[in-house]
Amino acid sequence: RAKLEHRGHYCYYTRSMGGEMRARVRLMQDLRQALGGGSLYLLFQPQISLGDGQPVGAEALLRWLTESGQLVPPDQFIPLAEDSGLIVAIGDWVLRGACQQLVALKNAGVGQFRMAVNVSVVQFRHPDFIGMLERVIAETGVDPANVELEITESVAMLDPERIVTLLNRIKEFGFTVAIDDFGTGFSSLAYLQRLPVDRLKIDRGFVGRIAFEGEGKNIAEMIIDLGRNLGMGVIAEGVEDAAQADYLRARGCHEAQGFLYARPLDAGTLLEWLRERGG
Ligand code: C2E
Ligand code: MG
Ligand code: MG
Ligand code: MG
């Protein structure tokens, strides 16, 4: 009986797995076509200085609107693209598009402005990553000093020597580097100190917890202090209300991004938003 039950369970398991697998393969095929077909696009979420409230930049965020009119969230399709390796081509497309947009903003009269772009760990460790960066700079004419590459703490799981070498090359081009979702990846502090990183980005999970005292010192506050001690800038993501912004400002956090200031905007709306703010 036990054996039968076990078997039944096994069959059920594989059948549902098979369905899930088919759905994944299907989504992958659609995504591959989307990359060539124009149903991928970028939105840009403003980042502001907490000191004076002025815009300092924007983060490029990828969107996928399928043929059937469904908006698939990046949290769903990015992992899929990473598993299949398609993220390398997608990431190339994203960086190129974000840099083109930055050049366009400059041409429209926007002054000092930074464009932040998410880089997957799969892209980062791809042998042609540096070559890709070189091509994007050459083809878009962007000034890398105004482009920030957002990597996650998972990058720190790679071979330490290799990462430091890679980050140094990236920095030689002039790019700045931020660690995204900081505080969620358990990277060692000793290690962090060795990385040529410009900015820590406090994960929005910690920002959302700011109002709930009682856990002692807030993690957001610890990250701000850490950034200060390491000589790095600190930006908070997911800032939704003025109380969070006040708390962060009072504790010396430099910059913020979140629905309190603006949702991710299309390029035209971003320019309007900046003009309204005198940018
Ligand atoms: P992320 O890089 O940490 O981006 C921040 C996410 O927080 C974005 O979600 C943004 O829309 C959302 N967000 C911003 N402000 C607020 C707020 O005030 N409240 C709340 N609740 N959410 C806020 P999104 O656009 O859905 O992206 C999710 C994740 O997908 C990103 O997290 C990033 O890890 C990944 N992603 C997006 N675009 C790309 C891309 O081009 N390449 C790669 N590799 N990953 C990307
Ligand atoms: Mg990001
Ligand atoms: Mg983030
Ligand atoms: Mg996040």
Image: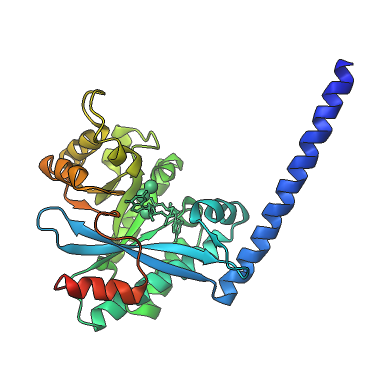
- Res. 279 image quadrant: bottom left
In x, y percent, where is residue 184?
A: 38, 37
Q: Which residue is drawn at 27% across and 75% down?
A: 271
Q: Residue furthest top?
A: 1
Q: Which of 186 and 4 is in front in this view?
A: 4
Q: Is residue 214 left or right of residue 160?
A: left
Q: How many marks?
A: 0
Q: Is residue 275 above or below residue 9?
A: below
Q: Is residue 255 above or below residue 227?
A: below
Quadrant containing the N terminus in the rendered view: top right
Q: Which of 213 and 237 is in front in this view?
A: 213
Confirm whether residue 203 shows in the render. Answer: no
Q: Which residue is drawn at 30% across and 49% down?
A: 237
Q: Which of 177 and 115 is in front in this view?
A: 115
- Res. 94 image quadrant: bottom left
In x, y percent, where is residue 228?
A: 16, 41
- Res. 191 image quadrant: top left
In x, y percent, where is residue 85?
A: 59, 57
Q: In this view, does 254 lie to the left or right of 197?
A: left
Q: In this view, does 119 lie to the left or right of 89?
A: left
Confirm whether residue 195 shows in the render. Answer: yes
In x, y percent, where is residue 66?
A: 59, 67
Q: Residue at x 20, y 76 (%)?
A: 110
